[in-house]
Image (cartoon, rainbow, N blue to C red):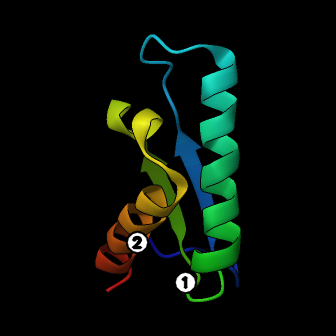
Amino acid sequence: MASLHAFPRVGFVVPKYKHTGVDRNRLKRRLRELIRVDVLPELPPMDLVIRVLPVAYTRNFETLRAEVLQAVRRIAR
């Protein structure tokens, strides 16, 4: 969705999916770092909400990065 701000904003919905709070917070930290480093510099001004699926808890950092970048590129087009 186009944003009224001059910069992109990204939010996450990370349900527990029977995982602990530690697991959930670790996943959110990974996602924030991916967005900060790889996505925000390329993203046009927009509001983006990413809903995380249960399989994200099992992904390593590189796989998670590839999937997030692929999804964001599809959305940003």
Q: Secondary structure at mark 1?
A: loop
The amino acid on which the numbered mark 2 sits, given as a three-letter code, is Val
Give the Cα separation between the discs numbered 1 and 2: 8 Å
The front one of 42 and 5 is 42
The front one of 56 and 2 is 56
Report the residue at 42% width, 36% height from top: 58
Q: Secondary structure at mark 2?
A: helix
Residue 63 in picture, x, y percent from top left: 41, 59
Decide which of tag 1 and tag 2 comes sooner along the chain: 1
The amino acid on which the numbered mark 1 sits, given as a three-letter code, is Leu
Q: Residues within 10 Å of mark 2 (few under 14, many from 20)?
A: some
Above or below, 49 against 58 in this view is below
Report the residue at 36% width, 62% height from top: 67
Quadrant (top left, top right, bottom left, bottom right) of the N terminus = bottom left
> Count of labels shown?
2
Above or below, 76 against 15 in this view is below
Q: Residues within 10 Å of mark 1 (few under 14, many from 20)?
A: many
Query: Can you tell which quarter of the image residue 20 is in?
Result: top right
Residue 27 in picture, x, y percent from top left: 60, 39
Quadrant (top left, top right, bottom left, bottom right) of the C terminus = bottom left
The front one of 36 and 44 is 36
User: Residue under circle 2?
Assistant: 72
Residue 62 in picture, x, y percent from top left: 49, 63
Q: Are marks 1 and 2 in contact (CB under 8 Å)?
A: yes
Report the residue at 61% width, 65% height from top: 34
Residue 9 in picture, x, y percent from top left: 64, 66
Left or right of 22 on screen, residue 67: left
User: Residue under circle 1?
Assistant: 43
Report the residue at 65% width, 87% height from top: 41
Query: Can you tell which quarter of the image residue 72 is in?
Result: bottom left
